[in-house]
């Protein structure tokens, strides 16, 4: 049932984008609210993003429009399409945009539905859900799951990844590789001996700076939660 709802939402978002007013905008006039900045930094440096930029270069712009809602005069707020927006910004191209005045709740619902297309990881979705909860858009994870058509267990797992210590996650090569099992193992290490865990993070951070490289998930987990 949840999958059917998400598919329906994705189709509705696509229809809304096609029916909304379309324009080519300067990427610099589009603002991304803090609670929508859920992407891992690696999402704009990996091969998939390079391929997206190459495709946009070939076509002279993004074929699939992003979506925004009106903000301050002459400004707009992003609803979905962060990777396409960033690609056009880096390429110095105007971005094909669907403009529609939707409220914050509808914006989040359409963004979450579009994440199947945008390849958001469980960790990234967790960051989005946690930000929405912190912003007060939903009173609880259960209500968020109901509104988004997501399974509560799925939402809880995603939020669990997003709640991992930021200083530890920063040492990981790519947080999009995080799994629920890894998160539970790390959370257990934190709860068992917080001071010892903090020491491990500090030691691992020093090693990472000296070698100038982040760790793969397996090595990262072995060092922090042996």
Image (cartoon, grey):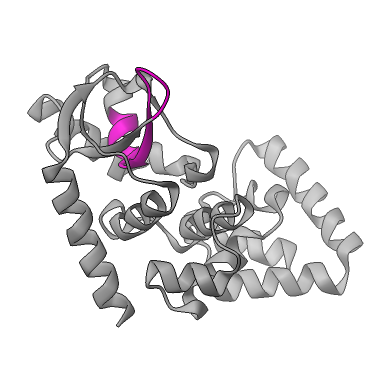
Q: In percent of the image, x 17 and y 26: which residue is there?
A: 23
Front residue (pair 160, 25): 25
Measured from the top left, where is residue 173 in percent x and y? 54, 49
Magenta span: 71-87
Quadrant showing the N terminus: bottom left
Q: Evaluate whether residue 156 shows in this view.
A: no
Tell whether position 76 is magenta: yes
Q: Is residue 130 left or right of residue 145?
A: right
Front residue (pair 205, 187): 187
Front residue (pair 80, 135): 135
Tell me if residue 59 comes above or below residue 48 in the rendering.
above
Q: Across the whole image, how many numbered discs are drawn on residues?
A: 0
Tell whether position 215 is magenta: no
Front residue (pair 180, 134): 134
Residue at the far bottom: name it.
1
Residue at the far right: name it.
195
Measured from the top left, where is residue 179 in percent x and y? 52, 69
Tell me if residue 95 comes above or below residue 110 in the rendering.
above
Q: In percent of the image, x 58 and y 65: which residue is there?
A: 159
Q: In this view, does 201 lie to the left or right of 2?
A: right
Measured from the top left, where is residue 106 in percent x and y? 37, 53
Q: In percent of the image, x 27 and y 26: which residue is there?
A: 88
Quadrant housing residue 165: bottom right
Quadrant showing the C terminus: bottom right
Q: Is residue 205 left or right of residue 62?
A: right
Q: Evaluate whether residue 142 shows in this view.
A: yes
Tell me if residue 1 comes above or below residue 162 in the rendering.
below
Q: Is residue 126 left or right of residue 77?
A: right
Measured from the top left, where is residue 97 in percent x and y? 21, 32
């Amino acid at each position: 049932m949840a999958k059917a709802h998400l598919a329906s939402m994705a189709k509705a978002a696509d229809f809304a984008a096609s029916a909304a007013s379309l324009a080519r905008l300067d990427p610099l006039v589009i603002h991304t609210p803090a609670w929508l900045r859920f992407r891992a930094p690696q999402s704009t440096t990996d091969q998939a993003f390079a391929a997206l930029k190459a495709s946009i270069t070939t076509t002279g712009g993004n074929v699939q429009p992003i979506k925004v809602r009106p903000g301050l005069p002459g400004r707009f707020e992003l609803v979905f399409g962060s990777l396409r927006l960033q690609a056009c910004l880096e390429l110095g191209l105007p971005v094909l945009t669907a403009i529609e005045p939707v409220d914050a709740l509808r914006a989040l619902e359409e963004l979450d539905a579009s994440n199947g297309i945008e390849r958001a990881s469980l960790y990234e979705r967790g960051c989005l859900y946690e930000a929405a909860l912190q912003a007060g858009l939903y009173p609880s994870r259960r209500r968020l799951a109901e509104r988004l058509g997501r399974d509560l267990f799925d939402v809880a797992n995603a939020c669990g990844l997003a709640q991992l210590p930021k200083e530890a996650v920063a040492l990981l090569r790519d947080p999009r590789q995080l799994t629920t099992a890894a998160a539970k193992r790390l959370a257990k290490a934190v709860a068992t001996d917080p001071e010892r865990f903090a020491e491990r993070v500090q030691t691992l951070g020093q090693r990472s700076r000296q070698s100038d490289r982040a760790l793969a998930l397996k090595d990262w987990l072995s060092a922090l939660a042996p």
